[in-house]
Image (spheres, coloured by chain):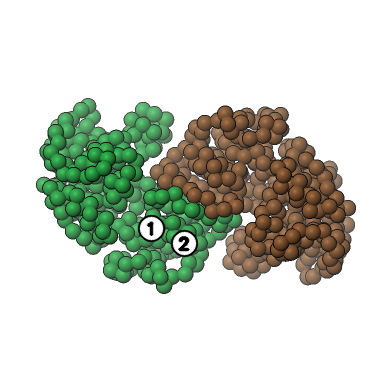
Chain colours: A brown, B green
């Protein structure tokens, strides 16, 4: 099968053997996949990953338990052991023995077929097309914030960053009833949020004022410092981004203002799928281009050149 | 009056005018004061402070409202405006218009007399001697953690750092019922904790394993990194220290493990005074030396040379 493989130095679309089902797994024929910034970090060496890239996809179960075969699905990306203390506490996404699809020790979905544990699968409703369903994974990451922070109707928050994740986070918080201010560098991306009723401002025109809730989704040291400055005393700062280099960070305001900093990673699929099916989140507006799997490296290049979401067409 | 004054380049004991009471303030004759690491940072330029240093003290009210005169007192150090949104929310310690005794815009207690707002005063019980009462402020900072985190009996936590604050924090958490492991570099300081039933280990002999609650009280970038490594997924990391330079920080584990980082600063005086009066916390063991106010700079030098608590004898 065709797959976009990273060998530690180069990402290439090559021919690889089909994955085989094992106990409790299914093989899914991938229809459409999405490029995430994490993929771009991985090909720069993040996590030391080697293998087939990709962890955002939608497809149809080709092989596995009979009740799953033929179903259109998306899949959670953390493959937990199911037996450890974390798993017993319901924290499968934090299982220390986990592999992660296309990120850590497990092949990903930029391929004609991908193998995933059955318990990671979610059925896609018929009303939800592939082009929207492929956003389940990143949208779940945005919904994770609602698991960590209570959003009261009208609660004020600011989202820093108008990248793919920032645009999803701002919409999820607004959908939950918050009054959101989105700060970014790209007028055309902020316009997408403005159409959804989110207040927006260009970073160049914005001076931080204290908010009770701030979400950092820029992934830059500058964004982190702005986010700290925009969090009011005893306020909450949610970190959705990882940072490529270890940035120099002034931790003093976190201590002095007794800020709560919450790391936030993968999230629950069900509310994301529901929101996509109900068209409560604009994801089409995030799509910059669609690239065939055979031209996989070009998809990564396009994503790295500052595009918003690049989709990889597999089937 | 004699006072240890910092002019922006030098800390000297000099003669200064007596403070006068104003509306809602009292003038306290200082008996005993304590040197804090923050004082050492201030004379290195932190906060750009100019004035009389010192924010840990015990004394007797000399002038002010009649019902306070003659009382032995300690004082909270944040002088709030009492009128702003933060004050109305009960967050006087975060009042944006506040001054802070000996730290920000208000003279401190390394002096024969200090002026403080009456509402900041706490009466010292007769059973609590000056040498213990002078620890009210730093112990309150340790008690702040109990305002921020729920300590269940037997809950496991690690305290990094065996400086003055680390020793107080470890005792407060143990007193609250936690099973505490204290990690430090000084066998003689850890021994103080061991005598209180706290488990201890030398940092050189310790490899971080995941704890649900970690308190960082080293103030070093190395300590911060260790603290992050010792916080289990979805665990809590309390930052009690500020950091002199902006350290390079790897934020990725905070995001990946969805760690809650809580900045923690000043705390409530009442539980601290109660714990001191009930002898539930060993503070005498922290005292390295007592230095007369006239030799104030020597007190700072002694504190900077790695001593534990240096007390300044005023009256």
Question: Could you tell whether A299 is left or right of A46 in the image?
Answer: right
Quadrant in the picture for residue B189: bottom left
Q: Is residue A206 above or below residue B70?
A: above
| Chain letter for the residue marked with disc 2 in the picture | B
Q: Residue B181 appears at what percent x and percent y?
A: 40, 66
- Binning the other alpha carbons within 10 Å of mark 2 as few (below 14), some (14 to 19) or many (20 upward) gives some
Which residue shows up at 85% across the image and 60% down it?
Answer: A2
Which residue shows up at 56% across the image and 51% down it?
Answer: A263
| Chain letter for the residue marked with disc 1 in the picture | B
Query: Where the N terminus of chain A falls, by quadrant?
Result: bottom right
Which residue shows up at 39% across the image and 55% down it?
Answer: B219
Question: Could you tell whether B143 is left or right of B155 in the image?
Answer: left
Q: Residue B139 appears at what percent x and percent y?
A: 30, 52
Mark 2 vs 1: CB contact within 8 A = yes
Instruction: State the mark number for residue B9.
Output: none
- Report which residue position mark 1 lands on: B218
SS under mark 2: helix
Q: Is residue A294 above or below residue B202?
A: above
Question: Could you tell whether B181 is left or right of B72 in the image?
Answer: right
- Binning the other alpha carbons within 10 Å of mark 1 as few (below 14), some (14 to 19) or many (20 upward) gives many
User: As rendered, which of A66 and B11 lies closer to the eye?
Assistant: B11
SS under mark 1: loop
Q: Residue B133 appears at what percent x and percent y?
A: 21, 51
Q: Is residue A101 above or below residue A271?
A: below
- How many numbered circles does the render carry? 2
Q: CA distance from mark 2 to mark 1?
A: 10 Å
Quadrant in the picture for residue A97: bottom right
- Report which residue position mark 2 lands on: B226
Which residue shows up at 70% across the image and 57% down it?
Answer: A43
Q: Earlier in the sequence, mark 2 or mark 1?
A: 1
Question: Could you tell whether A116 is left or right of A264 in the image?
Answer: right
User: As rendered, which of B177 and A146 lies closer to the eye?
Assistant: A146
């Amino acid at each position: 099968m065709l797959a976009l493989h990273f060998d530690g130095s180069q990402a290439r679309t090559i021919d690889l053997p089909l994955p085989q089902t094992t106990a409790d797994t299914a093989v899914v024929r991938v229809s459409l996949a999405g490029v995430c910034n994490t993929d771009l970090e991985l090909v720069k060496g993040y996590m030391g990953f080697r293998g087939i890239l990709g962890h955002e996809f939608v497809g149809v179960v080709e092989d596995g338990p009979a009740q799953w075969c033929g179903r259109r699905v998306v899949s959670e990306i953390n493959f937990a052991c199911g037996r450890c203390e974390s798993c017993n506490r319901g924290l499968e996404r934090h299982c220390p023995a986990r592999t992660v699809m296309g990120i850590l020790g497990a092949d990903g979905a930029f391929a004609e077929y991908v193998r995933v544990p059955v318990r990671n699968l979610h059925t896609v409703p018929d009303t939800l097309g592939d082009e929207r369903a492929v956003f389940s994974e990143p949208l779940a990451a945005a919904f994770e914030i609602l698991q960590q922070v209570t959003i009261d109707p009208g609660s004020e928050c600011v989202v820093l960053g108008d990248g793919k994740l920032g645009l999803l986070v701002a919409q999820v918080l607004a959908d939950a009833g918050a009054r959101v201010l989105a700060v970014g560098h790209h007028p055309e991306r902020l316009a997408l949020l403005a159409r959804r009723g989110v207040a927006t401002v260009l970073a160049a025109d914005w001076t931080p004022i204290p908010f009770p809730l701030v979400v950092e989704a820029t992934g830059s040291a500058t964004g982190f410092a702005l986010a700290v400055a925009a969090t009011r005393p005893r306020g909450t700062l949610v970190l959705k981004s990882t940072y490529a280099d270890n940035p120099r960070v002034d931790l003093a305001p976190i201590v002095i203002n007794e800020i709560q900093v919450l790391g936030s990673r993968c999230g629950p699929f069900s509310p994301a799928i529901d929101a996509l099916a109900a068209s409560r989140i604009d994801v089409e507006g995030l799509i910059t281009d669609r690239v065939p799997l055979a031209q996989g490296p070009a998809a990564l290049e396009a994503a790295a050149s500052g595009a918003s979401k690049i989709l990889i067409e597999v089937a």
